Amino acid sequence: MSNYYYYRSSQRGLGRIRRRRRREPRFPFLILLLLLILIAAILVLGKNTGLFVPGRATASDASESSAEETGSLPEETTRSAAEEILRRADRLAAQYDYDAASALIESDASAASSDAGKAALARYAEAKEGLVPQKISDIPHVFFHTLIIDTSKAFDGDSRADGYNDVMTTKSEFLKIMESMYERGFVLVSLHDIAHEVDDTESGGKKMASGEILLPEGKKPFVLSQDDVCYYEYMEGDGFAKDLIIDTDGRIRNEMVMDDGTVSVGSYDVVPLLDDFVEEHPDFSYRGTKGCLAVTGYNGVFGYRTDTDYEGKNPNIEQDRETVRKLAEALREDGWEIASHSWGHRDYATISDEEFEADTQKWQDRVAPLIGGSDIMIYPFGADVGDWHPYTSDNARFERLYSEGFRYFCNVDSTQNFVQLGEDYLRQGRRNLDGYRMWQDKTVKNRTSEFFDVDEVFDPARPTPVPDYKGG
């Protein structure tokens, strides 16, 4: 009862009270006093016992609050966290990293003690028993250039059309090749999975050791790379993406200029398309590996005009350089490796010593700081600095590249597999899956039948015959 209501009730009964004897007790006041005492007692009791009173949490709420204060979690929250751990563990196991998957589950008591956790650990242990070591000499390496997204613009008959037809692959072809290789049991691995540097106790330095790649019976490892991930200026308007970006969700995507001049964000080249494919088919990737991206520097990196030659021309050059640094970091976290493709896309087998030295230094000065350096050299035009014999200290160009930290060297070789493990380097031949290669497969000699059926992959939008443009 409010004070106002009590006041008005007292006034209405005032006349009757005055007619009573003056010593008669005022019962309403006594009742009110008793009520106040009773309410106070309930409040005190509720505080000490946790009984419900207005404005206080329920007993269930109180237990959750207490759990938070003591560091424990409510049962539903604990169950949800354990389910997320099991989901992440299954993803690791799908990519053949059973040790990491088991360790993740065992790191959480709730997940490890659950029936689902115990079943997963048993399943991983059984799967691990069936893994087979892979022979590194049998690992192929395939590569692509920037993918053609709009064939009507790339194959429009201008001076660049023959070059695109020769060395580029269309989006349709790329996706069909990936699907075919997945169905045939191929699994993405990295150059660093094939071999890696270890301490050499005899020399006190480093040496290259063969890696251990463990896959289920029937699975076949391969390396994938992409050349010229720079989105050159000459490609503008010819049906290609314009750059790489990190979208608002933190994913690596492309920007592409549409016919109406608007810029669309999507999967318009190898990186996001392969990311999408692995997201759908995690077992296509060995422990999260994607591929290797080879970059030059004369036109900048990843579609950004970052080279010193653009200073004074590109007003956003410092911002673009920072964007490239962030992209390089994000790409590596996403399972990609980054390689040198020289600074000026030069033929390292034929240029003069002075040109070779200048180009090597430009890449180290202008590109390496943006991408975080690299130990991989992917030769432009596939032109190696030596023949098929192992590199030696007599090879001055190899020694120069080695001094800059390069340990992995990739040329172009049409043989099935070329893998050379030297004492201090790994060398691998790459096979081009482009217009010229597929046209040759259709008409002369098929060198890619273990990967796909060329008649099912070849894009009918290509002009034929496909000329040998001698691109790289």
Image: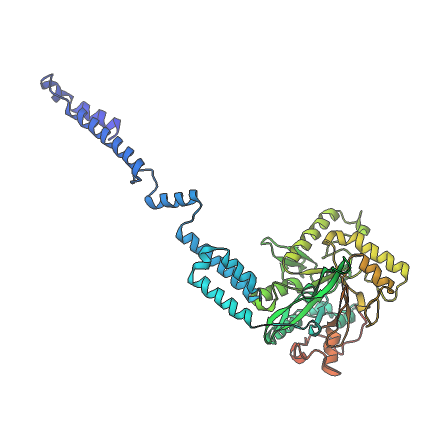
Q: Residue at x 70, y 53 (%)?
A: 324
Displayed quadrant of residue 179: bottom right
Of all residues, the one furthest to the front in this rendering is 202
Query: Which quadrant: the N terminus?
Result: top left
Residue 428 on image: x %, y %:
75, 69
Q: Check the image and report above or below for 257 versus 218.
A: above
Residue 346 on image: x %, y %:
83, 63
Q: Report the front residue among 17 and 176.
A: 176
- Relative side of 44 to 118, left or right: left
For the question of whether residue 324 can be seen, the reply is: yes
Q: Report the front residue among 71 and 297.
A: 71
- Relative side of 313 to 132, left or right: right
Residue 74 on image: x %, y %:
40, 50
Query: Which quadrant: the C terminus?
Result: bottom right
Q: How is the image coloured?
A: rainbow
Displayed quadrant of residue 158: bottom right
Displayed quadrant of residue 245: bottom right
For the question of whether residue 157 can be seen, the reply is: no
Q: Residue at x 48, y 57 (%)?
A: 84
Exactly how many numbered labels are in the figure?
0
- Relative side of 70 to 236, left or right: left
Of all residues, the one furthest to the bottom in this rendering is 444
- Relative side of 208 to 218, left or right: right
Residue 177 on image: x %, y %:
65, 73
